[in-house]
């Protein structure tokens, strides 16, 4: 599986935008870029995923570099409920997601 | 979106006993279910992949005789931890491949404590 690299932790102020980076230089043409987040003692929650084009949904935006070797998850206005571990994962459709260490996001009032 | 219901949320059992964890897909048919384990302060680790009507595929280092997986229907997959020991205490999570635009769906997890 192609691997991803994320910062261990990031901090943001409430109601400010947050940009969570992810590097995936060995991504293959069939790999989708997935983002999930996990709150303590809960199962992961789907955030967003994409293949080549930027994606937007009600939770976040995903900006994918033109060469697909990196991507950025954008939370437009961070809230305290957004504090979680965010995982950037590459996967081919139907195969298990392999989780790395993710980025622990701290949101301060 | 697709929902996976996982039960129980938490369970405490005595060493040597068995515990069954259930994951049900509520509004879709899951031909495949993934089972993960997560120790404190660590990431999720894939244990096995269950496929409806066939034997599960286990990751290297996971004892198939200890962690019994059954996927007898398109809406139910179960993980049974047999002869549980304190080192099996962990957070167990199931997941099904996504449908449509919603990515993969995860259960809420089961906190197993073996005493």
Image: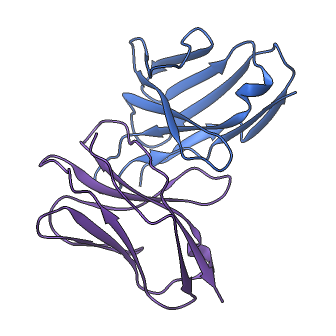
Chain colours: A purple, B blue
Quadrant of image for the N terminus of chain B: bottom left
User: Image quadrant of residue B10?
Assistant: top right
Image side of residue B25 versus residue B85, left or right: left
Which residue is depicted at the point 66% across and 57% down? Answer: A40
The front one of B95 and A20 is A20
Image coordinates for residue A38, horizontal then vertical, percent: 55, 58
Residue ID at (66%, 89%): A109
Q: How many marks?
A: 0
> Residue at position x 21%, y 56% from top?
A25
Instruction: Assign the C terminus of chain B to one quadrant of the image.
Output: top right
Name the image quarter holding residue A65: bottom left
Q: Position of residue B49 (x, y in %)?
A: 42, 25
Q: Is residue A40 left or right of residue A28?
A: right
Residue B43 versus residue B57 in the image, above or below? below
Nearest the eye: B32 or B91: B91
Residue A107 drawn at (x, y percent): 60, 80
Looking at the image, which residue is at 39% across and 34% down?
A: B29
The residue sitting at the top extreme is B65
List x then y, in percent, for residue A105. 55, 71
């Amino acid at each position: 599986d192609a691997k991803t690299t994320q910062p261990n932790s990031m901090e943001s102020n409430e109601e400010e935008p947050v940009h969570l980076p992810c590097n995936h230089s060995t991504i293959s043409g069939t790999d989708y870029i997935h983002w999930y987040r996990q709150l303590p003692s809960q199962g992961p929650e789907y955030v967003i995923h994409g293949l080549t084009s930027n994606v937007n949904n009600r939770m976040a935006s995903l900006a994918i570099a033109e060469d697909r070797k990196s991507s950025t998850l954008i939370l437009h206005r961070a809230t305290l409920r957004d504090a979680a571990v965010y995982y950037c994962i590459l996967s081919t459709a139907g195969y298990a997601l392999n989780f790395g260490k993710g980025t622990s996001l701290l949101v301060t009032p | 979106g697709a929902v996976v219901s996982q039960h129980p949320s938490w369970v405490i059992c005595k060493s040597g006993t068995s515990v069954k964890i259930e994951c049900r897909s509520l509004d879709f048919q899951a031909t495949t279910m993934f089972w993960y384990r997560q120790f404190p302060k660590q990431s999720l680790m894939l244990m096995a992949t269950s496929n409806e009507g066939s034997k599960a595929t286990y990751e290297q280092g996971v004892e198939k005789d200890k962690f019994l997986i059954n996927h007898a229907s398109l809406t139910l997959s179960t993980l049974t931890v047999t002869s549980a020991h304190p080192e099996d205490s962990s957070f167990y999570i199931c997941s099904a491949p996504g449908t449509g635009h919603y990515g993969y769906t995860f259960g809420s997890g089961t906190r197993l404590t073996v005493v």
